[in-house]
Image: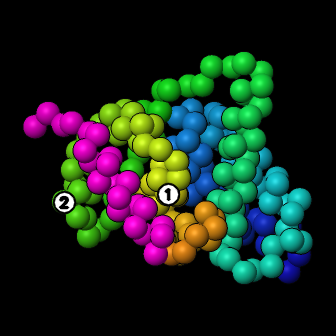
Amino acid sequence: MSHTDSMDRMYRKHSQMIYAFLLSRTGEAALAEELTQETFYQAVKSLNSFKGQSSASTWLCGIANNVWLSHLRKQKRSGEIFSSDEDEACFASSSAESPEDKFIRKADNLTLMQALHEIKEPMREVLYLRLMGELSFREIGQIMGQSENWARVTFFRGKKKLIEGVKIDE
């Protein structure tokens, strides 16, 4: 199988997850699509360096995160104003929802994104990777250079802060 075939399969399998992750970061569909394409371009350029020590989704999320951070640095240098219109982003729901998950799901996306924006790094990054990227705690730990347990604890502490920051009219 050629590199082109493997990248094509990888794109078909992971592009929606990468797009959702970047959409959650940017809040702009067009920018998320552009950054998704850049992520896969960078992946093609560095495919030979992928040793399979992590899953392809973890590797791609790491690249997407770097593409996003690079975009932010370029934006900051050029003096552009960051967009705060993140209401297009949505949270993934699971089949076994906890009360916290149901509470979060009831909130409108703009309220959630505003509350997420108030959470400090690295907790915010862990929340994004888990909720938008739908990554496992092991994969998040690998991306962040931490343990799976650290990712799990950071996520649950962040989820608690997120719930405290969201007020829903019932």
Percent x, y of residue 92? 39, 56
What is the distance, in whole Å, between disc 2 and disc 1 at their CAs? 20 Å
Membership of 83 in magenta stretch: no
Q: Which residue is drawn at 59% across and 46% down?
A: 22
Percent x, y of residue 161? 32, 48
Membership of 159 in magenta stretch: yes
Q: Residue 145 carries which label?
A: none
Disc 1 residue crowd, few under 14, some 14–19, many 20+, Cα 10 Å = many
State the residue in front, 1 or 63.
63
- Disc 2, SS: helix
Q: Which residue is drawn at 32% across and 47% down?
A: 162
The magenta region covers 149-170
Quadrant position of residue 26: top right
Q: Residue at x 77, y 21 (%)?
A: 78
Secondary structure, magenta segment, majority class: helix
Answer whether labels 2 and 1 touch (C-beta < 8 Å). Answer: no
In the image, residue 109 sits, relative to residue 129, either above or below, namely above
Q: From the image, state whether disc 2 or disc 1 is nearer to you.
A: 1
Q: Residue 126 carries which label?
A: 1
Give the total number of marks visible in the rendering: 2
Quadrant position of residue 71: top right
- Disc 1, SS: helix
Query: What's the amino acid at mark 2?
Result: Pro
